[in-house]
Amino acid sequence: MSDSVSDCTEQRSAVTEAEVEALVRGICFKTGPPRTLGVEVEWLVHELRRPQLPATPEQLEAAYAALRTLSLRSALTVEPGGQLELSSAPAGSLMECIGSVSADLDAVRAVLREAGLGLSGNGHEPWNPPSRYLREPRYDAMERYLDRTGPEGRAMMCSSASVQVCLDAGYEEPGPLGHGRRWWLANQLGAVLVAAFAHSPLARGHYTGWRSTRQSLWTAMDPGRSAAPPLGGDPRAAWARHVLDAPVMCVRAPEGPWEVPEGLTFREWTRSGTPPNRADLDYHLTTLFPPVRPRGHLELRMIDAQPGEDGWIVPLAVTAALFDDPEAAEIAYRTVKPLAERAEGLPAPSNPLWIGAARHGLTDPELREAAVICFAAAAEALPRLGATAEVREAVAEFTDRYVARGRCPADDLLSQFHSQFHGRLHDRPHDRPQDRSDDRSQNRSHGKDIRT
């Protein structure tokens, strides 16, 4: 969401349809040995003493002004609803990535505490309706565009948060680390990651019927913008076609509101009397939100924000292991290949496999079985990636607490929600004692420092 693009850049020569296809094919899959790793962590910002209350615009303005004075290795950006995002620099190893982002988060939290604010890792704001903080032409246009298809767009803009893992595209050649295999794996394994890390079952104080309400938003939105291109064949060609056939969200202007065309694809724009330029193409690419977005590297966008100060480290470590370790990547590929039939040939996230993952989490038996195998493969691979004992222990605790039992973080939030808001009204004899002990265990496990 917080792609770094200027509001309106200088005009350059127009690009033709053929030039767009060539540019997209050249810049979106940059191949080579997988050597770097990155993560983007988004957080909801709230009052420190009363976490159910969001920060006011005045509080956010003062806090973000103070944060911009910090010297951080990560890029600090603000989402439309005031969510905070830290985007790591490309790191040469898993532990380098964890160390740099953790240090930045420590500095950020210290400043926010002074302002009476805190961060929460929920995939979707549990209590409050969407409220836009940023008033910029980009987000004004985005809101107008997304409102055409329903309220999900505003909720995505203002109420959602995620952990996005960024991986090198992979080798040009085929094999477990080849870019074609990694592209396919990201779009299929993504459903397992959705289910395992689902953490957004509430909206406006009610259970939505989804373990990942955040993922349900993407499912309901304009498929031309949020869907993946068809799998199979050359990923570069498929993505180039997808970019050209995707609808144009807006046409930027140096002054005043941006135009929001209706029913205009980028391909049609290149054929018009006022075709786009290279800067328009660059901007158009930032308005496409598939679950896996090729940006030279692969940006995996499907994981909900996680509970606890360091909960984001587990999906980062597991995902890195399943993609960058050849043995683990091969196991993951063989494990999720049978699941592909459930997608029925439809693109993510609007296919039965991904919808089931978002709605049911790991209560889905097939997704649970796949997650058990994949998490075991990741655990075996993490020492080979140089992961510390603390990181390996955090992954093991998450596996024991959730994956092995067919649970995800959303289930803990639901247990707490029912206990807090419904337990006083009537007895719940079906509540299991381990649900309450799980809540205490979660507080212990997430309070542990796993960063070094």
Image (cartoon, rainbow, N blue to C red):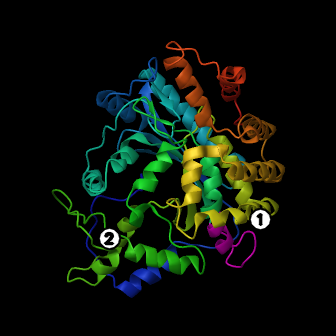
Q: Residue at x 49, y 31 (%)?
A: 119
Q: Secondary structure at mark 2?
A: helix
Q: Amino acid at mark 1?
A: Arg
> Is mark 1 in CB contact (under 8 Å) with mark 2?
no
List the single residue furthest toward the left. Answer: 256
Label 2, residues with CA under 10 Å away: few <14, some 14-19, many ≥20? many
* Residue pictured at 64% horizontal, 22% vertical: 431
- Nearest to N terminus: mark 1 or mark 2: 2
Is 169 rendered above or below residue 147? below
Question: Is residue 211 visible to the viewer in this orientation of the structure?
Answer: yes
Please give the name of the residue rendered at 37% of the width and 61% of the height, measured from the top-left corner: 222
Residue 334 marker: 1
Residue at numbered disc 2: 280
Magenta residues, as a range?
169-185
Q: What secondary structure is found at the residue carrying circle 1?
A: helix
In terms of depth relative to the viewer, which is nearer, 146 or 67?
A: 146
Q: Does residue 346 appear to the left or right of 9 in the view shown? A: right
Residue at 37%, 48% in the rendered image: 152
Task: Give left or right: position of 327 versus 240.
Answer: right
